[in-house]
Amino acid sequence: DVQAEMQEFRTDLQADMKELRSDVQAEMQEFRTDLQADMKELRSDVQAEMQELRSDVQADMMTLRTDVQSNMKELRSDLKADMMTLRTDVKDIKETVNRIEASQTEDVIAMLKVGAQRSETDFRYLNTRITDIDKRVFTLENRPES
């Protein structure tokens, strides 16, 4: 009797295991199918987003290119106008210098020397001040925090 019951129990257990295996396989197949569908949908969504992003970037690049070209044209135009003004000013300066040189060469040389001396004095003064300020900043930077 015990062997018969054990055999019956084993048979029932094997049947239950087959049924469980079949259920698990069915659930796994359903899960796999759902997962594949979700992945396809996700891939489609990502591709659509990427295409939209690509279109936006291309539009922005075109706008940026147009803006840069416009700015460059404006800059060229402004630069040409400034260069014309600069040329005119340089010509005027040259004429003035030539006129001054012709009439007062020695005075101009003396004025230039005085100007050079002033510039040298100013340079030394500023250099000393900058060095002093730099030294103060260095001292402050290296001072231990309280």
Image: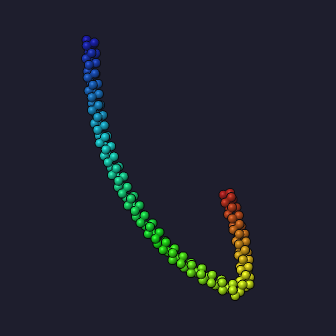
Residue 7 is at least partly visible in this image: yes
Instruction: Decide if residue 54 is on the left or right side of residue 6.
Output: right
Expressed as whole percent of the image width and height from the top left, the position of residue 132 reads 71, 67
The answer to which of 87 and 22 lies nearer the viewer is 87
The answer to which of 99 and 47 lies nearer the viewer is 99
User: What residue is at 26 percent from the left and 21 percent from the top?
Assistant: 12
Q: Residue furthest bottom?
A: 103
- Quarter holding the N terminus? top left
Q: Based on the displayed image, in which of its 4 quarters is residue 118 positioned?
A: bottom right
Up/down of 117 relative to 24, above or below: below
Instruction: Decide if residue 131 is on the left or right side of residue 54.
Output: right
User: What residue is at 66 percent from the left and 84 percent from the top?
Assistant: 98
User: What residue is at 66 percent from the left and 57 percent from the top?
Assistant: 145
Expressed as whole percent of the image width and height from the top left, the position of residue 131 reads 71, 66
Instruction: Decide if residue 32 is on the left or right side of residue 84.
Output: left
The answer to which of 18 and 78 lies nearer the viewer is 78
Up/down of 80 relative to 21, above or below: below
User: What residue is at 47 percent from the left and 69 percent from the top?
Assistant: 72
Q: Based on the displayed image, in which of its 4 quarters is residue 6 positioned?
A: top left
Residue 118 is at least partly visible in this image: no
Instruction: Decide if residue 110 is on the left or right side of residue 27.
Output: right
